[in-house]
Amino acid sequence: MSKIKVQQIAVVGAGIAGATCARALTLAGHSVHVFDKSRGPGGRLATRRVEWVDRLGQSHMTRLDHGAVGITARSAPFMAFVDEALRAGGLAEWVPSLAAGSVPAEDGDRFYVPLPDMPSLCRRQLVGAAATWSFAVDGLHKGALGWHAQAGSKVHPEPFDAVVLALPPAQAAALLCPHRRDWARHASIAPMQPCWTLMGIADTTREALEPALDWDLARPPTGPLEWVLRNDARPGRASVSGQAHWVVHARPGWSRRHLEQPAAWVQQQMHAALVDTLGRPVDWHHCAVHRWRYALPQAQKIAAAESFWWDADQGLGVCGDFLGGSGSSGVEGAWLSAQSLSAAMLQSASGAGRASTLSAAHETALRTVRHRAA
Ligand SMILES: Cc1cc2nc3c(=O)[nH]c(=O)nc-3n(C[C@H](O)[C@H](O)[C@H](O)COP(=O)(O)OP(=O)(O)OC[C@H]3O[C@@H](n4cnc5c(N)ncnc54)[C@H](O)[C@@H]3O)c2cc1C
């Protein structure tokens, strides 16, 4: 009977999927080490710290949530997680006032927003796990002692009994290729939508004579922009007199068509579209764009399929929003996928506690678990 000891587990990717998986495995007594290419956790639950100088030469710092707009909850387990985070003060409810003529959201316009910033939801879940930041894993090698993670010329010295990949599919595919070509192929064609995002701080002092905007979220029915939001109107975000903090997301189709355009061109186009939406000029203190190559799974193309992948023989697992869970996508899908993967890993452990083992023969069904979404 082949057995894999699961004591040390590497989780590659510290977005909501990786952080959720790390949390469940840490709570079960395993030793978890998280790797991320960024300087901290969050992934697409992202908040950017912007430093800028006003016309009088004064320095300012503003935080803008330029990734996920908000969290929605449909499934009972995720609702329970959201409720707990609300009670603990880690999430706040955001019911934005919608601009006239906006396209209403499928689930209604009620979101949950992590406090004080978007990555905090992941940061909290990583308590108890070791982490190495700025480590872009580009190779996973299986040696006599277990898995090793490599980033460029650096090989992390600790061997791991199991590895979890919690990455967007294209990035997971590259790492999976030498170990599970079938998964790699599947991940490499998983459809993801791109998103160009504009974020900026506008000076509103000259707008004093204009009628005040009475909304903080717009979803224009046509044109390049899908979401236009006032970041400073979101719960727990700083609001400064004389400033409007805008985050603007382009539609997936528009973003795809202009994916390779220079940032300056994209900024100009999105600025013009924002002016159209607001019906007034925008006077920037600071403005920038960010390209999300893999923003969201293409919802309509996610058939009821696997919500995670787990190969107990190799000690290799995959989770993330592209696998989703119970037909959900986005943050909820990533969370559900990670919960299912960690449950399968723990379920296939023979014997509870720290020095647990995975028994592949004992858990035949979990050798390569392919759970159909309910
Ligand atoms: C603009 C935008 C708007 C969105 N709006 C919403 C919304 O309103 N509601 C919603 O539910 N969802 C929304 N989403 C989607 C949501 O953010 C994601 O579905 C979810 O955060 C994905 O979590 P994840 O953990 O699967 O992946 P990610 O958050 O992408 O985490 C993956 C992590 O892996 C790291 N990584 C990647 N490659 C490597 C590597 N080689 N080595 C080490 N680390 C690596 C990344 O740095 C990242 O931290 C939005 C996304 C974007 C971009």
Image (cartoon, helix red, strand yellow):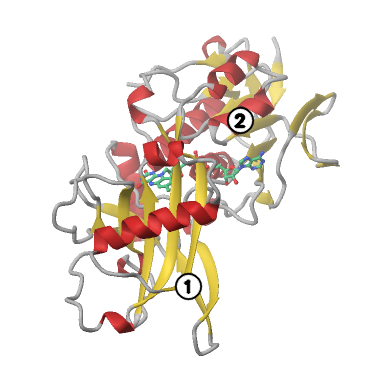
Q: Which one is nearer the viewer's eye here, 279 or 231?
A: 279
Numbered badge on residue 62: 1
Percent across and percent down for residue 370 are: 48, 16
Q: Residue at x 14, y 52 (%)?
A: 101
Residue 1 position (above or below residue 103): above
Q: Residue at (24%, 83%) from the top-left corner?
A: 208
Left or right, 82 with respect to 201, comes to left
**Quadrant of the frame with the N terminus:** top right
Establish if 252 lies above or below 92: above
Quarter holding residue 107: top left
- Return the residue found at the far left: 100
Task: Give left or right: position of 75 versus 192.
Answer: left
Q: Which residue is mark 2?
A: 172
Q: Is residue 103 visible?
A: yes
Quarter occupied by residue 337: top left
The picture places residue 97, in percent across and down from the top left corner, at 19, 61
97 lies left or right of 24 = left
Residue shown at 56%/10% (left/top)?
364
Residue at position x 68%, y 50% from top? 130
Assign the C terminus to one quadrant of the image: top left
**Depth check: 148 or 261 in front?**
261
Could you say whether the residue bearing mark 2 is in a helix, strand or loop? helix
